[in-house]
Amino acid sequence: MTAIRGHVAATRRPGALGVHSIDHFALMVPDLKVAEHFYRNFGLDVRAEEGGLSLYAYGQPHRWGRVMEGATKQLHHVSFGAFEDDMPRFAAHLQSLGVQRIDAPAGFESNGIWFRDPDGALREIRAAEKSSTNHKAAFAVPICGEGARGTVSREEAPSVRPKRFSHMLTFVGSAAKAISFYEQTVGLKLADAAGSDVAFMHGIHGSDHHILAFATGGGAGLHHSSWDMGGIEQIGLGAMHMADSGYARGWGLGRHVLGSNYFHYIRDPWGSYAEYSADIDYIPVTQDWEAKTWEAHNAFYLWGPTPPEDFVTNFEVQ
Ligand SMILES: [Fe+2]
C-alpha cells in the first residue's frame, strides 16, 4: 500500500515478465443490496459506482473489487496489475503463446489485455500501480502488562476493518492445467501445492505467499476473497460482528499450513466466502521460493475446527 501512497517504490524483479498484483476482481450477483449488506458488515468501504458496487478498504484509494447485478452469482473476471512498460511485452508474449486477445466485456471497457483461461474464465492484464504489498504485512499481538485490564467490555468492542485485499482462491477445471497456464501467460509462480487439486501462486515482484490460488472444482468460480486484518484480535472481532449480523456460517478460527495465515472464513450469501486473514507468509522480490507439493491431509490447516462438509464446493457450476 505504501507504493500507492507514494512513500516507497514498488519492488520489481529486473527484466522478468510477470504481473505484480491482482488489481481487482468482479462479481455478478442477483441482488446488489444483499451484496452491499454483506461486504459493508464485513468491514469494507462499499461505494455505489458505475452502475454497481465498488469494494475498497477504508482509507485507501485502490478499488479491490466490483460487484454488478446479474442473473446468477458468478465470478465475472479477475484483473491482474502489471508495470506499464511491460504491457507491450505482455501483448507480444500472449500472442506468441496463441492466447487469443478479446474485446473488453461490456461495462468494463479498458485499455487492458483481455483473454480467457483454459476454463473460459475472463481475465485481464492492465497497467496499474503495484497493489500487492512490498513487504510482509504487520501483525499486531496486543500484550497487556501487569496491573492493567487487557480488554474493553463487549459493548465497547471496536468495529474492525480489513487493511487490504490479500488473495483469492478460484475454482478451476484442473489445478495442474491452471498452474501451467498462469505461469506461462501472466508469470505467476507456484509457491506450494496440496496434492494435485489445490495450488498457491505468488507474484515474482514481491507478494504474499499467494495472490491467486486454485482448487479443482468442475470449472471456473470464486471460492473466496481474502483480506488482511493485521492481527488475531481483529479476525475474532470481525467474525463475531458477522455472526451478529446474520453471517454465522463459515470456518474458523484456525491457521493454515500453506501460507501460514490465521483465518476465519465467513460464508457469503451465495455459498462462497470472504476470509479474514492475518500474518500470511511473504515471498520477497529477492527470493527464489522453492515450491513444494504437500500431502493434502497434512497441508490444509495446522489447527482449527473441522471445516464444513461443503467447504470446497463450486456453487457456480451446480
Ligand atoms: Fe485464503
Image (cartoon, rainbow, N blue to C red):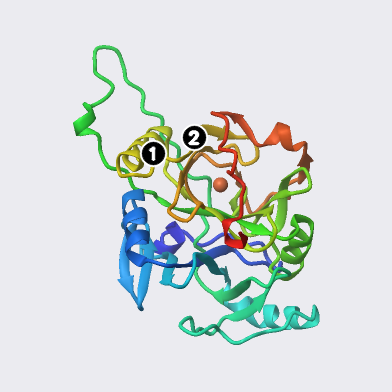
Quarter placement of the N terminus: bottom left
Residue named by callout 2? 252
Question: In the figure, is residue 163 to the left or right of 157?
Answer: right
Any mark on residue 239, and which? Answer: 1
Question: In the figure, is residue 235 to the left or right of 287?
Answer: left
Front residue of 310/287: it is 310
Q: What residue type is labelled 2?
A: Gly
Q: What residue type is labelled 1?
A: Ala
Quarter placement of the C terminus: bottom right
Any mark on residue 163, and which? Answer: none
Residue 179 visible in the shown view: yes
Residue 56: % across, % down:
37, 61
| Classed neighbour count for the residue bearing mark 2: other residues with Cα under 10 Å, few (<14), some (14–19), many (≥20) | many
Under circle 1, the secondary element is: helix
Residue 284: % across, % down:
62, 50
Under circle 2, the secondary element is: strand
Mark earlier in primary sequence (2, 1): 1
Q: Residue at x 51, y 52 (%)?
A: 272
Q: Which residue is drawn at 35% across and 60% down?
A: 34
Q: Do the residues labelled 2 and 1 touch (CB within 8 Å)?
A: yes
Place residue 168 in its image quadrant. Answer: bottom right
